[in-house]
Image (cartoon, helix red, strand yellow):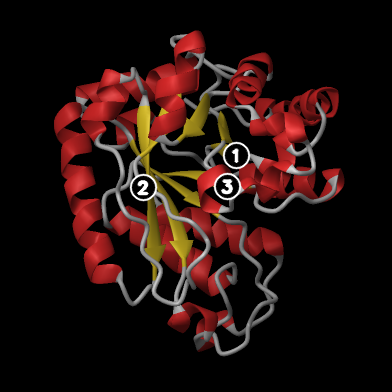
Amino acid sequence: MANRPALAELGLNTGKKARLHRILHQHGLGNGTAFFLPYDQGLEHGPRDFFENPAASDPRYIVKLAVEGGFNGIVVQIGLAEKFYWDYAGEIPLVLKLNGKTDIPSDARALSPVNATVEDAVRLGADAVGYTLYVGTPSQEADFEQYRRVRDDAHRLGMPLIVWAYPRGEAIEAKGGKDSFYAVDYAARTASELGADVVKVNFPHPEKRAEVPGTYDAEFTSQQAIDAVVRSANRTLVLVSGGTKAGDEAMLEKARESMEAGATGLIFGRNVWQRDHDASLRFVSALREILAKHPST
């Protein structure tokens, strides 16, 4: 089992360290692992994601589910945070997502515009902020610049910064695609290089090798690929995304391999709330059993 970086090794200021400690050791399992429930898909994908379980279209249902499931935090955009987090403020950490976009335009030149501030997060009682960084997009100059301002504000206000490091754009699609081992590995390293405290990545697919750089055009197991991604993040904590809903065993194996690689935890949304209430909690319980086997300091 890989070693996970301890909070003392992350170079955090006092505010960031206090908030991350609260997330990792006072919520969830309290053992230094993390399990987040993201709920920004209504903006990113539109209401279609709620058709499978219509109850999930109600933010009140989702926040209550996060509390019932013993998550380390819930991720929402500012409108939902202002209208729905209030009922459970203090009971579960809030991660305020600071940027987002619809999926209506093409991703060829993807850019996720900022719609909230770190100051908003402080006002709302958040314990972290989230930023989507599109690694490889032709719009990276604008993306890096708005990210720099968010990073500076997060440092100044002692707010942990979680980066959604998502490969996107024409060049990425021409080199294996957005969830290839090459793309995910590059995204993890980019987030670390640019000062993320935590990075959220998709699980890499080493079998996607069309036109990837030569070092990635080889046979890798999924475990070898996620091991390398966590190494690339080095002293940036890693959260592995659930992505599109899949079968239980496939998702549990993804969780096992991620935690074996040294990830800090998981961030599963659709794979949780696209199930009915009781099935969601059963699935969460199985994931918590995996996290319990990988305590961190």
Which residue is under mark 2? 99
**Residue, x 52% and y 61% (percent of image)?**
103
Is mark 1 in CB contact (under 8 Å) with mark 2?
A: no
Q: Position of residue 170 (x, y in %)?
A: 46, 82
**Residue, x 47% and y 60% (percent of image)?**
166
Which residue is under mark 3? 240
Q: Residue 266 carries which label?
A: 1
Q: Is mark 3 on a helix, strand or loop?
A: strand
Confirm whether residue 48 shows in the render: yes
Locate residue 19: give its quadrant: top left
Closest to the camera, between mark 2 and mark 3, is 2
Is mark 1 in CB contact (under 8 Å) with mark 3?
A: yes
* Relative horizontal placement of residue 253, taking residue 203 as reference (left or right): right
Instruction: Give the CA separation, mark 1 to mark 2.
Output: 21 Å
* Residue type for callout 1: Leu
* Residue type for callout 2: Asn
* Relative horizontal placement of residue 141, taking residue 261 as reference (left or right): left
Pick whichever of labels 1 and 3 is earlier in the sequence. 3
Confirm whether residue 12 shows in the render: no
Pick whichever of labels 1 and 2 is earlier in the sequence. 2
Instruction: Give the CA separation, mark 2 to mark 3.
Output: 19 Å
Q: Residues within 10 Å of mark 1 (few under 14, many from 20)?
A: many
Instruction: Give the CA separation, mark 1 to mark 3.
Output: 5 Å
Is mark 2 in CB contact (under 8 Å) with mark 3?
A: no
Q: How crowded is mark 2: few (under 14 residues within 10 Å), some or many (20 or more)?
A: many
* Relative horizontal placement of residue 185, taking residue 177 as reference (left or right): left
Q: What element carries label 2?
A: loop
* Relative horizontal placement of residue 223, taking residue 101 as reference (left or right): right
Q: Residue 113 carries which label?
A: none
